[in-house]
Image (tube, coloured by chain):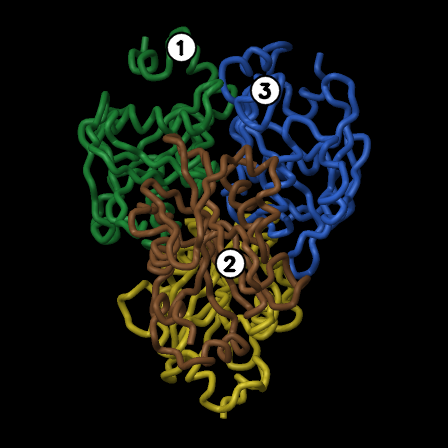
Chain colours: A yellow, B brown, C green, D blue
Amino acid sequence: MSRTAVDSEGAWFEPGEMDALRRKLPIPYVDIVPVRTDVDGTIQQVGLLLRASGEGRIVRAIVSGRILVHETIREAITRHVEKDLGPMALPRIPVSPAPFTVAEYFPTPGQSLFTDDRQHAVSLAYIVPVDGECAPQEDALELTWYDVAELRQSSVLEEMEGGHDVIVRRALSFAGAL
Amino acid sequence: MSRTAVDSEGAWFEPGEMDALRRKLPIPYVDIVPVRTDVDGTIQQVGLLLRASGEGRIVRAIVSGRILVHETIREAITRHVEKDLGPMALPRIPVSPAPFTVAEYFPTPGQSLFTDDRQHAVSLAYIVPVDGECAPQEDALELTWYDVAELRQSSVLEEMEGGHDVIVRRALSFAGAL
Amino acid sequence: MSRTAVDSEGAWFEPGEMDALRRKLPIPYVDIVPVRTDVDGTIQQVGLLLRASGEGRIVRAIVSGRILVHETIREAITRHVEKDLGPMALPRIPVSPAPFTVAEYFPTPGQSLFTDDRQHAVSLAYIVPVDGECAPQEDALELTWYDVAELRQSSVLEEMEGGHDVIVRRALSFAGAL
Amino acid sequence: MSRTAVDSEGAWFEPGEMDALRRKLPIPYVDIVPVRTDVDGTIQQVGLLLRASGEGRIVRAIVSGRILVHETIREAITRHVEKDLGPMALPRIPVSPAPFTVAEYFPTPGQSLFTDDRQHAVSLAYIVPVDGECAPQEDALELTWYDVAELRQSSVLEEMEGGHDVIVRRALSFAGAL
């Protein structure tokens, strides 16, 4: 029934099959923190999506999604950026495959700082500067750019779920902005 | 039927089931380069296993294996080090979850520098200094420690398959030894 | 006439000479976050020194100091850990020379998140697990181990100066503990 | 007498003064590997300068230079890229201040993999993708772009001095290209 799954990730799973797989294996993911940078590489702004969570609440989120079988990490990053930010975002995919952090999502809260009801996901996190025009796609309602100073002081990060706030903080920390 | 799979990774897959899963999803792995270090952290030696490859050839290999569902990366590293190097190896698991590189193994040669007939694996690679006694376990025939200078000059790394030599070189490069 | 400078860094500078040099060149430093880790590499505790600041206030601090001419980074880390934590600390110097962050200290507040009245320092920051007995040396009054949970909630990090709190937070973030 | 030093690094040193300082303190540097990347972030080409070495030989080199007092690392990277590649290079300065490696240059060969007759330099190494037009400036005779495959097989890297070949190899290794 999940039209999104079919459209964005290919039609090769039967209904319910992916759910069954998620109980058997950890699922490789990419988490992407979209940023606007200054000409000297300093992060100026972080882009956060507004989207409906599984439970129907509206939450802030970063770009995130599965790595498909036979897909490279670079392809997965490109595909998810395009899926969420549109085809004109002009992302600068990192030169190194080494993520700045790895987020381990578990269904059971407390096993790590990251939770995901649906699955155990092992997510490689990357900072991706985008230079072009971003337009939220599909199930994202809105994309908002937040100044780094704003993120430090406001409660925006608390509107994130599953540990996405931790990933944004780690990204800013890694980038020397926090 | 694979006794090893049952013993080392739990008995919860039917025969053939894991093979089927491997065709559907990328499989999260850890690749571990065991090293002996000097008191100042310099890598002195790299430990390579001698094991029978799938095709019955004898190959040099690093420690490598799946992350199981509901298992943390730290648990997976610990389990695979113990499985291959024995319970007295005294590994020093890295403080950071960020791998020094990510190896993407594909069944089709040429899609990356890493190949694995059986599956598409996304492998997080870590350097793990070991301080204790190592004894090869299970299907590993032998563990040999090679001086860094030896690895630079000899053809030992060419006895590795699937790109394990690339991982060892990246590890030495990351550690400032190459 | 600074006895400390003579004792800890060699007697080859005339009085006042180092001060003059500090106005001419950025000074390479190492900043070291001493930690106690669990057997699986998770950071359990962070060690903070209590010392007299230049202005006579008592502050919390991490281990920090200059890289001397002709000294390797590994030697500098070893020397400063021994200077501040004593000869029995059994530090595990990182295998890689790549720091988890670089702190740029400037005399003028606001040019970065790090300040140092005396100089422009370019400091390479490392996490160093210590396994042995630590005893504060020389001008350090005390060494206290703080649980990670404690550091997250308490105001201990606010007792640090010059941006040392930022370095501790980045260390915990890099290590997946924050 | 050194016109270059005056032009590129400011006129505030007396003749001979910098030489004296170099004997007293390690000098903070940046080493920059300029690259052309594919749209997915993969390194396609590495840019190497042709320049006259101190001894009058012609050598291949990467972009490299001092961090000046009161200058940020980002400013130093920007300045040296502009100095060597021209004002239209459009460099993408990395988002993180953490270098992919640190090269320790010593006057005495053998203390590390890096040598510099003039000084002990502590050099932070960065990969910098450039999107614009590059034109060698000042003392650089030429800039040549080499395909990654070419660098793997040819002897170009052997025309580099002081360990610059090691830095290029570490850069490619970090970027997953080697």
* Quarter location, residue C108: top left
Residue type of the residue flagged with mark 3? Pro
Residue type of the residue flagged with mark 1? Gly
Of C110 and D141, which appears nearest the observer? Answer: D141
Alpha carbon distance from label 1 to label 3: 32 Å
Question: Is label 1 on the same chain as label 2?
Answer: no
Front: mark 1 or 2: 2
Q: Quick one: SS at disc 1? A: loop
* Residue D72 visible somewhere in the drawing: no
The numbered mark 3 sits on a residue in which chain? D
Which numbered dot is residue C16? 1
Q: Badge 2, how many Cα within 10 Å: few under 14, some, many 20+?
A: some
Q: Please give the residue where the numbered disc 2 appears in the rendered image.
A: B52
Q: Residue A77: x and y, percent?
A: 57, 66
Which numbered dot is residue D97? none
Q: Badge 3, how many Cα within 10 Å: few under 14, some, many 20+?
A: few
* Quarter location, residue C166: top left
* Residue D121 visible somewhere in the drawing: yes
Task: Tell me, yes or no, whether the two marked residues, 1 and 2, touch with CB atoms within 8 Å.
Answer: no
The numbered mark 1 sits on a residue in which chain? C
Q: Please give the residue where the numbered disc 3 appears in the rendered image.
A: D109
